[in-house]
Amino acid sequence: MAQGIQDLLPAYWLPAILSGVILLLSITPMLVYVRVGWRAKALDIKNSLGPSACLLYFKAFYASAHVPEDEADATRLFNALYHDWYGRRFFIVPGIVYFLTMLLSISLTVFTLVQPASVAGGPFGVVPNPAIAAMAGAFMWCVNDQISRSRRLDFSPSDLLWSALRMVIAVPLGYAFDALVPAAIAVFLAFALGAFPLTTLQVILRRLAAKYLGAEDTVEQAGDKIICLQGIDTDIVERLRNEDVTTITQLAYCDPVRLTMRSNLTFTFVIDAMSQALAWLYFDDKLDLLRPIGLRGAIEFRHFVEDLDSTDQSAGQVKLTADALEAFPSVLRALSLEPADGAALRMTMREIAADPYTVFLSEVWDEAGLAG
């Protein structure tokens, strides 16, 4: 038996080396992100949260827990909290699952396609061509997706698990199409469907199943108006939906650090989106009318109210207050309000400005030097 194994090993050198190279290609994006990208993402957040913003963060999002006594303590606790919740160690288990899944899938595919002429069937036996094609399509999608994510710093442990799942379901998908469609197109369709994202594939399968079962395909309810916010497109809406943020209210009062790490959007973008969402809660689509005059979110409303109500008599602040008073009638006109509605509008703007989440967002925005 030992002699038989020794005779077979040289015959499998080529597929083994080829499998190793392909496996290295599949795990390189993950390794690059964990080694370099994760640190860049962490610095993006830590550099945006100064000591005072860290203290406000704990007051806004961890009020029921121990609130740091001073800014230095807040910075230390924030760094500890960040590593506890989003440290590199969370990539270990998903990374192992992804590695083993890719190892098995790649070996199964390569050893089937690159069989030594002297060994019939290869070590895995005969695998149907549609199953091999489906795995090849899934591999193409997974690796392409992860290269893109690593490049744009949009990588999370769950992405590794989604890729592993995508590879696992490729085999039954290939077998299914081998049984359902003509043999002439089974391989092509299996490969093509393997290259689809998992969400798209679910829609296709649901529709096919509904057609064969004679049932109606359920249509998802229209989402909230998150897409109406400036800078939000369908891809961003989908990423927010994956993190269970589906309404403007949820976006307005979410934890920006958690949302940044889970969605892999930039911290500045999340802060800006939350600022717009907070203002939208009060003005709805009328917020579009206020953007041309500089009031596009809660942060800008807070700055405007501070200038409007300021009693500071310094030369610079007196000028800012005068400009705010002069601009206030323009805000009334933009909203089609009468001068008599000025007091009510001021009250609304003060409510936005005094919201604890607005205070936090404004502090972060100003402290990071993002304000104009």
Image (tube, rainbow, N blue to C red):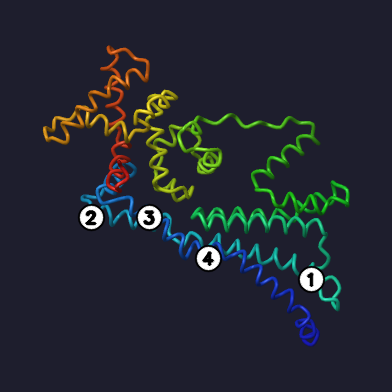
Q: Element type at marker 3?
A: helix
> Which residue does the image show at 67% across and 43% down from the upper left?
200
- The label number, if any, that marks residue 114 in the structure image: 1
Q: Which of marks 4 and 2 is in front?
A: 4
Q: Residue furthest left?
A: 313
Judge left or right: residue 149 versus residue 361: right
Q: Nearer the viewer, mark 3 or mark 4?
A: 4
Q: Is disc 2 surrounded by few (<14), some (14 to 19) or many (20+) residues within 10 Å? A: some
Q: Which of 143 and 92 is in front in this view?
A: 143
Looking at numbered disc 4 in the image, what kind of residue is underneath it?
Leu
Q: Distance from label 4 to label 1 (Cα)? A: 28 Å
Q: Distance from label 4 to label 2 (Cα)? A: 33 Å
Q: Distance from label 3 to label 4 (Cα)? A: 21 Å
Q: Earlier in the sequence, mark 3 or mark 1?
A: 3
Quadrant of residue 324 within the rendered picture: top left
> Which residue does the image show at 50% across and 43% down from the upper left?
243
Return the x and y of residue 182 as percentages of the image width and height: 88, 48
- The label number, if any, that marks residue 72 in the structure image: 2
Position above or below: 257 against 3? above
Looking at numbered disc 1 in the image, what kind of residue is underneath it?
Val
Q: Is disc 4 surrounded by few (<14), some (14 to 19) or many (20+) residues within 10 Å? A: some
Q: Distance from label 1 to label 2 (Cα)? A: 61 Å
Q: Which of marks 4 and 2 is nearer the N terminus?
A: 4
Looking at numbered disc 3 in the image, what kind of residue is underneath it?
Tyr
Q: Element type at marker 1?
A: loop
Q: Which of marks 4 and 1 is nearer the N terminus?
A: 4
- Residue topped by disc 3: 82
Looking at numbered disc 2 in the image, what kind of residue is underneath it?
Ala
Q: Is disc 1 surrounded by few (<14), some (14 to 19) or many (20+) residues within 10 Å? A: some
Quadrant of residue 111 within the rendered picture: bottom right
Q: Do the residues labelled 4 and 1 touch (CB within 8 Å)?
A: no
Return the x and y of residue 62 as percentages of the image width and height: 33, 44
